[in-house]
């Protein structure tokens, strides 16, 4: 792609200025339409050091209303300092519907630099390329307009520009050691950029701009942007077809076939609870020291006992090292972004524990049944969720998913108790009763969810909760066992 790039021919400056002026006017006119159509636009600008990425962004946004756009420069920093999955800063930066975002370098620069520094293995490089393709496809399928530009200059031009910047005390600071290293290894970077672009060109195409002719690059970038916006505005927001990858799935029972009779005596419950909470407290210190992230997901029927279960898990943990996120209906700024955004932004740092009370699975349950998303949206979500969870476990996270299960009679008894107990009445709402009337539809949706998203790397655990004590002990045992296994694996890998 870059090796075969042909330089632009010289063009008259006056003609270029007129074209840029006309394109800028079109872009100004598109602002309100973008907002009205709720079209989110993400422009990724990659390229060589000193190629003029910042200047290009400045030219594009010069006349746009600043309330409609944002410019983000994600730092290329080691994961040991960032302590989040590698896509985290880019997923967190995606714009709201009706707004534009310009990324001054992004996932391409991050992956290529780490590959050439040998900071990631060949296997990890392939994982990141796959994650990038998944991320870009999910944005596209969710209605985002994504434009990827690469600003290209040759080795001689880069050398001249870097030298010019270094000769001036006021601009010398703009040249980093990484920039100088990139120039010394220009051919290696050229090959690596080429390979990355070839491997991430399937869902969102790359566009290479001639950075040696600055005005031409500005004209070409603006032309691409306004034409793609026009095309996106002419039709309804793009909605991708369901996309399925063959994930290794575990066979799960249907909820109707789950035996809910297991119980535990009060004496055994107290003894096991004390022992397991003590062990969990010890393991929390270990995972913090070893920087292992832990994500625990709770789903289940209303009144199944999720809250009580979470409290018994949280009690022995150091409050500085965990968070509990109760997930309700999305707020307006969350609803205006791709549905996984609000979970990306709540992920734990390495060494921390994050507990979700309700999760991204709302997409294939409540959003599906209440009509908050289209059929294509929720059918596509199974694969998108499997991809998301694979990225989390590839990062090194311990990911546990619990379905807290009860039968209808037990739910009715608990609803009635809440209704008749003043201090518990806040726990019961009209929506709970309405959802109960849809038990068969929800059960069907949950069965499908369990069948399609219980993967080898992120299996579902059905927790029988007619006896709340039994459910708490079972969940704690699973958590303790998983953390012990993760710590043991980390110990072995440190000696490999």
Image (tube, helix red, strand yellow):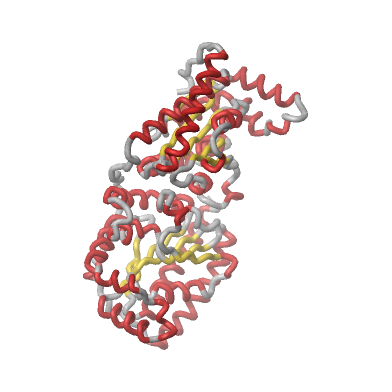
Picture coordinates of residue 479, whole percent (x, y):
44, 68
Q: Is residue 382 above or below residue 300?
A: above
**Residue 377 versus residue 385: which sits nearer the camera?**
377
The number of numbered badges drawn on the structure is 0
With 450 as the anchor, is 305 left or right in this view? right
With 50 as the anchor, is 237 left or right in this view? left
Residue at position x 40%, y 61% from top?
A: 329
Q: Is residue 191 above or below residue 468?
A: above
Residue at position x 28%, y 63% from top?
A: 446
Farthest-out residue, right: 169
Picture coordinates of residue 327, whole percent (x, y):
43, 63
Quarter of the image for residue 171 reads: top right
Q: Is residue 259 visible?
A: yes
Residue at position x 44%, y 45% from top?
A: 97
Picture coordinates of residue 110, whole percent (x, y):
54, 39
Q: Is residue 48 above or below residue 124?
A: above
**Residue 114 versus residue 441: which sits nearer the camera?**
441
**Residue 185 versus residue 324: which sits nearer the camera?**
324
With 474 as the anchor, is 42 left or right in this view? right
Q: Is residue 77 above or below residue 256?
A: above
Q: Quadrant of the N terminus?
A: top left
Quarter of the image for residue 104 reads: top right
**Residue 333 versus residue 398: which sits nearer the camera?**
333
Picture coordinates of residue 267, whole percent (x, y):
42, 88
Q: Is residue 119 visible?
A: no
């Amino acid at each position: 792609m870059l090796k075969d790039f042909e330089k632009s021919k010289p063009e008259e400056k006056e003609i270029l200025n007129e074209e840029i002026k006309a394109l800028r006017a079109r872009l100004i006119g598109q602002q309100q339409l973008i907002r009205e159509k709720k079209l989110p636009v993400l422009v990724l600008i990659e390229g060589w050091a000193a190629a003029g990425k910042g200047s290009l962004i400045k030219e594009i946004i010069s006349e746009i209303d600043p309330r409609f756009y944002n410019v983000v420069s994600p730092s290329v920093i080691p994961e040991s300092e960032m302590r989040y999955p590698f896509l985290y800063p880019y997923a967190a930066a995606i714009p709201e519907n009706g707004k534009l975002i310009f990324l001054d370098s992004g996932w391409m620069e991050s992956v290529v630099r780490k590959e050439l520094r040998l900071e990631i293995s060949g296997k990890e490089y392939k994982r990141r390329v796959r994650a990038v393709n998944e991320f870009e496809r999910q944005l596209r399928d969710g209605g985002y307009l994504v434009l990827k530009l690469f600003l290209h200059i040759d080795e001689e031009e880069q050398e001249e520009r870097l030298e010019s910047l270094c000769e001036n005390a006021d601009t010398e600071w703009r040249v980093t050691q990484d920039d100088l290293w990139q120039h010394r290894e220009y051919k290696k970077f050229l090959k690596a950029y080429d390979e990355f672009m070839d491997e991430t060109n399937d869902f969102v195409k790359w566009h290479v701009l001639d950075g040696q002719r600055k005005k031409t690059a500005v004209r070409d970038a603006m032309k691409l942007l306004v034409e793609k916006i026009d095309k996106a505005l002419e039709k309804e927001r793009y909605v991708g077809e369901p996309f399925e990858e063959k994930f290794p799935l575990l066979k799960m029972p249907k909820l109707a076939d789950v035996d809910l009779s297991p119980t535990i005596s009060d004496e055994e419950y107290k003894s096991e609870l004390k022992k397991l909470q003590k062990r969990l407290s010890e393991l929390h210190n270990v995972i913090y020291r070893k920087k292992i992230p832990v994500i625990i997901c709770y789903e289940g029927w209303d009144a199944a006992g999720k809250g009580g279960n979470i409290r018994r898990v949280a009690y022995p943990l150091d409050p500085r090292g965990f968070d509990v996120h109760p997930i309700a209906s999305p707020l307006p700024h969350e609803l205006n972004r791709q549905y996984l955004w609000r979970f990306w932004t709540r992920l734990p740092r390495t060494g921390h524990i994050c507990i979700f009370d309700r999760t991204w699975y709302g997409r294939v349950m409540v959003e599906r049944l209440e009509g908050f998303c289209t059929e294509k949206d929720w059918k596509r979500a199974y694969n998108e969720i499997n991809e998301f969870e694979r990225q989390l476990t590839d990062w090194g996270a311990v990911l546990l998913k619990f379905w807290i299960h009860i039968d209808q009679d037990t739910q009715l008894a608990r609803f009635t108790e809440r209704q008749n107990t003043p201090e518990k009445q806040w726990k019961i709402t009209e929506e709970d009763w309405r959802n109960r009337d849809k038990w068969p539809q929800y059960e069907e949706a949950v069965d499908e969810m369990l069948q399609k998203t219980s993967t080898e790397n992120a299996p579902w655990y059905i927790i029988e909760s007619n006896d709340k004590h039994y459910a708490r002990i079972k969940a704690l045992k699973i958590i303790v066992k998983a953390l012990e296994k993760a710590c043991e694996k980390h110990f072995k890998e440190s000696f490999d």
